[in-house]
Each structure stands twice: as C-alpha cells, then as structure tokens.
Amino acid sequence: MVSEDQIKQWKSSKTIGIIGLGDMGLLYAKEFSKAGWKVVACDKEEHYQALKTLHADLPFEIVANGHLVSRVSDFIIYSVEAESIEKIVSLYGPSSKVGAIVGGQTSCKNPEIAAFERHLPLDTEIITVHSLHGPKVSTEGQPLVLIKHRCQHEESFQFVQTVMSCLKSKFVYLDYEEHDKITADTQAVTHAAFLSMGAAWAKLKVYPWNMGLEKWYGGLENVKVNISLRIYSNKWHVYAGLAITNPAAHQQILQYATSATELFTIMLAHDKAKLVERLQKAKEFVFGSHKGLLLLDDKLLDKFSFSGSLDNAQGEPIPNSHLSLLAIVDSWYQLGINPYDHMICSTPLFRVFLGVSEYLFLTPELFEKTIDAAINCESFRRDDLEFVVSAREWSSIVGFANFELYRKQFEQVQKFFEPMFPKANKVGNEMLKTIASHSQ
C-alpha cells in the first residue's frame, strides 16, 4: 500500500511522458494531468504547432518531439500505431532519461517488447500497459493490463500502478505472451465479425436501419448495426495492429472466415441435419456448462435502433440466419477456445458479442427459428453471401500482413457509413452503458 505522502512526493517530483497524441494518448494525457500528475506529450513533429494551438487550454505540456519527452520523463508511454512501434522506439528510445520506466499502449505486445529490448538503454525499466477498451468508452471498471517485464525495483511497479489508478480501471497482471494470446482470443474474431458485417452492407449499398420490419429488426440486429458502425467510426490502425502483428490472431480470423464459408455451404445445400449436428457440437462445447442468467436480453436492446420505434409497424420481422453469430460460436469450437475463460480481460465489444451469441444459442425458440431460416428462408441469402465474401477478404488481408490494403478496405467502408457516426456513437454509448449495468 502506497502512502498518501509518497504519492504527494511522486506528483511533485515525477514527470509522465506520452509519445503519440492519438485518441488513446490524448485520453491518458488528460486523465493523468487531471489527477495531478505533471505530463509532457508529443505527436509527429509536423503537428506540433497545430496541437499546441488546439490543446492550449489543457493542463499538460506539448513539446516538439519524442526526444524532448524522453529526456525529462520518469515514466514514458508510447501510444503509437503497432505498425510504427519499432521505428519510433528506435528513434526516441536511446534518449530515455537514465533509470526511466518505459511502456507502450499497443494491442500486440510481442513486437513492442522486442523494440524496447533492442533500443532502450539497459538502465531503463520496462513496465507496459494496455487499456482494453476504445477512447469513447469510460475507463472506469474496464480491464487494464499491467506487464512487469524488466523491473529492478518494486517501487517502480508501485509507481506505475499509482499513476494508472486514476483511470479507475480493473488491473489485470499478465506477461506479454499471455496478453497476446488472450487479446487474440477475445478481440481478433470479434473485430473480424463486425468488420465483415459492415463491409457486406457497404458493398450491398444498404443502410440496415432503414429496412423497417423487412430486415435487421430487433435487439440482436441493433447490436450488429451499432457495434459495426462503432468500429468503423474509429481509426483503422487500432484494429489492423492487433490483427496483423499478432500471429495468434491470424489463425483465428482465418478460422472465422472458414466457419462462415462452411456453414453457408451447408445452408445452400439445405442440409438441416448436418447444420444442426455441427451447431449442437459448438453449442455444447461453448455453452454446455453455462449456469445462471444470460449476459443479455433481446428485449433490453430493442430500443437502441437508429430508425426509432416501430411499435406501430404491421407484420413480423423476417427471420435471420444470423450467420455472423453462428460462425463465431463455431470458430470458438473449432479452435478449442472457451470465451468465458477470458472474461477478466474482455473488452466491452467482446462482452456484447458473447452476450448476443449466448442469447441466440441458449434461447431454444430463437435458436430453432434461426436454424429454420438458415435452411428454408432465402431472404438473407444475398446478404449472407456478401458477408462470407467480406469475411474471406479480411482474412486474406490479415494473412498477407498488408497494412495498406487493410487501410483502404477499412476507409472505403468507413466513408459509406460516415454520415451516421455521430448518432452511432451516441446510441452505442447508451447501449453499452445499459448492457454493462445489466451484466453486473
């Protein structure tokens, strides 16, 4: 337990440095300085004057480059794109203050740790972090991974924990290899699913919330639309870094595309017995030991539609095959992943996706209706085909480790949905708050 006197002494004598003022870097700079820490930050040198002007009213110092941050900071956090971590650490790492603690905020720690070991002076300590949520989510109660990789003094780790405690997140203690395996298990397939949904709708030139009762109506559909748009409203490199730099993620994204393809092939063959057999095996593996309440309730999510209330609409919604959800559970089964094992490190999006998948598989009437629609209803065939193509495209891009192609594909879909992003984030925030409150 760190004393109040010690914290006061640290705040008067220590400086926190942040290299990279993207969304998460800026979030950290604001929260640390608001908590009373002295913060010095930078971004790309060509952005220096613009950022000085833009953030003139904020209580932290912006300097021209990472050398100036590194020379004065006792705890340096690299909040940069995963693709660039090696280059930026090689540039600024040697300038680290003697005895400084250095960490990073990338979503894949293997290349980050390798860059630190290659380029940091041996007198520095390496204690790295990862907030398992995006910049639009409140930090309170969210998982925050702390990785004590090279630490000569226990006081250094206490200092880092004290700094990070102002975020009011839940600390999770891992090594970097455990971190990368768990983030692949909880995030890679989740992102692939929602990216594929959005890409399919964009290629079909469909805004699903405009279809009324015809398609994509109801609580589960609201989740698909809200989360997909939430992902596309963020920066592409957030998802590219995790998918491309993490080898474990490659296998999982490939399996998701394979599961979607194989399930769709069974649907086209109208082979209900084969589909039921495969899905029952997946259901038993993933949900077989499930006890107690479900994470989500479809009725809870009905109100989070972009199209407003359809209470007075006539008719029944067309049943959906929910191929994206069937494929996630099938891929967990094929990979031998129990999603409940990693709830302590789960992101808000992962908990939502697990919740809707759980609701689908463990609500008997809905599960039976979904299987029947998958075999007998043609209404979603074109949409499911485009979804499978999109899932395979994302898998290929990740497999080729092509950041530029990833960016182009992401931004093309992003442009299609861009007019809806302000509303998507507002509705999405309300939905995540409701889900978090319910799942307590």
Image (cartoon, grey):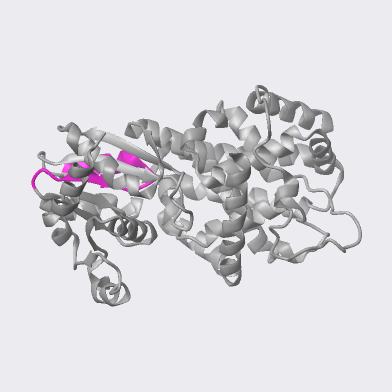
Asked whether residue 231 is drawn in magenta, I would say no
Q: Which residue lies furthest to the top in this view?
A: 289
Q: Which residue is drawn at 48% across and 34% down?
A: 344
Lateral position of residue 326 relative to residue 432, left or right = right
Q: Is residue 145 above or below residue 17?
A: above
Give the number of callouts: 0
Q: Residue at x 14, y 61 (%)?
A: 68
Location of residue 360 by image quarter: top right
Residue range corresponding to the magenta coloring: 98-118
Q: Picture coordinates of residue 332 (x, y %)?
A: 59, 32
Location of residue 183 by image quarter: top left
Note whether residue 262 is visible: no
291 or 36: which is nearer to us?
36
Note whether residue 93 is visible: yes
107 or 383: which is nearer to us?
107
Location of residue 232 by image quarter: bottom right
Lateral position of residue 124 relative to residue 362, left or right = left
Q: Is residue 271 above or below residue 432?
A: above
Q: Picture coordinates of residue 259 (x, y %)?
A: 64, 37
- Quarter of the picture containing the N terminus is top left
Q: Residue at x 26, y 74 (%)?
A: 52
Q: Which residue is drawn at 61% across and 43% down?
A: 353
- Quarter of the picture containing the C terminus is top right
Lateral position of residue 348 relative to residue 213, left or right = left
87 or 305: which is nearer to us?
305
Q: Picture coordinates of residue 291 (x, y %)?
A: 67, 25
